Amino acid sequence: MSLQLPTFPQYSIVSLVEKPYLLHTIRTDFFYTVEICVLTYTLQDKNQELAVNLLGAVDEHASGVLHELLDKLTPKDVVLNMEAVRYFNSIGIRAWINFVKPLVDGRRASYKNCPPDFINQINMMPLLARSVQILSFLSEFLCPECGHTQLQLFDAQKERDVLLQEFQGMVCEECGGDLAPEEDPQAILYFKSTQ
């Protein structure tokens, strides 16, 4: 008796020529979708700093990409746009720590648009942001009225108490109802006490 694996009726690959990253979307039925996105980046040279826009997953495949990125960096200050980073796994965290150590050597580095999962990682492992300034972060909110979820961007340069107040009074884009944070704002803002 052999094990029969499911077939995948829809399998699409975004062309590497059109997009600098590989994206597989595998859908077996209405409820099951798997998406794999390999880490990639773009560089934008701005007067005194270099903007690095990251896209994809920081996982077991990210180490080589991060080494390549380090080789391309100049002595300019670096701003890492984290908004499109999908997720981190434990092997990716190790690769990221090995990336950050030389990144901050001789230059200032900062994170912007940090997604909720990355903020959770920083809160569990403050080493991820020890020498890197957090400029802004995203937080998830849920509307109890209509069930809509949305991300809100926050300026991490503001004081913790000001940010806690901003978590109150968020309005749903769909129905205008009051939003509730998906996670405890005190827990989300833990990173403010470690910087």
Image (cartoon, grey):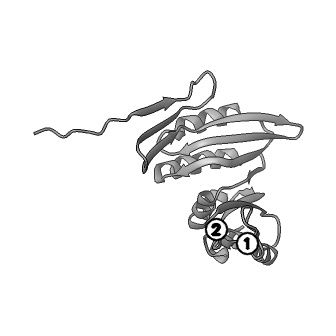
Residue with the mark numbered 1: 177
Q: Position of residue 33 (x, y in %)?
A: 45, 45
Residue with the mark numbered 2: 146
Callout 1, which amino acid?
Answer: Gly
**CA gap, disc 2 to disc 1?**
8 Å
Measuring 72% from the left and 62% from the top, which residue is drawn there? Answer: 174
Residue toward you, 157 or 152:
152
Q: Quadrant of residue 159?
A: bottom right
Measuring 57% from the left and 48% from the top, which residue is drawn there? Answer: 86
In this view, 22 is above or below 180:
above
Which residue is the extreme one toward the top? 17
Q: Quadrant of residue 106?
A: top right
| Mark 2, secondary structure of its residue | loop
Q: Quadrant of residue 154?
A: bottom right
Callout 2, which amino acid?
Answer: Cys
Measuring 89% from the left and 37% from the top, which residue is drawn there? Answer: 47
Label 2–label 1 contact, CB within 8 A: yes
| Mark 1, secondary structure of its residue | loop
Residue toward you, 151 or 48:
151
| Precedes in sequence: disc 2 or disc 1 | 2
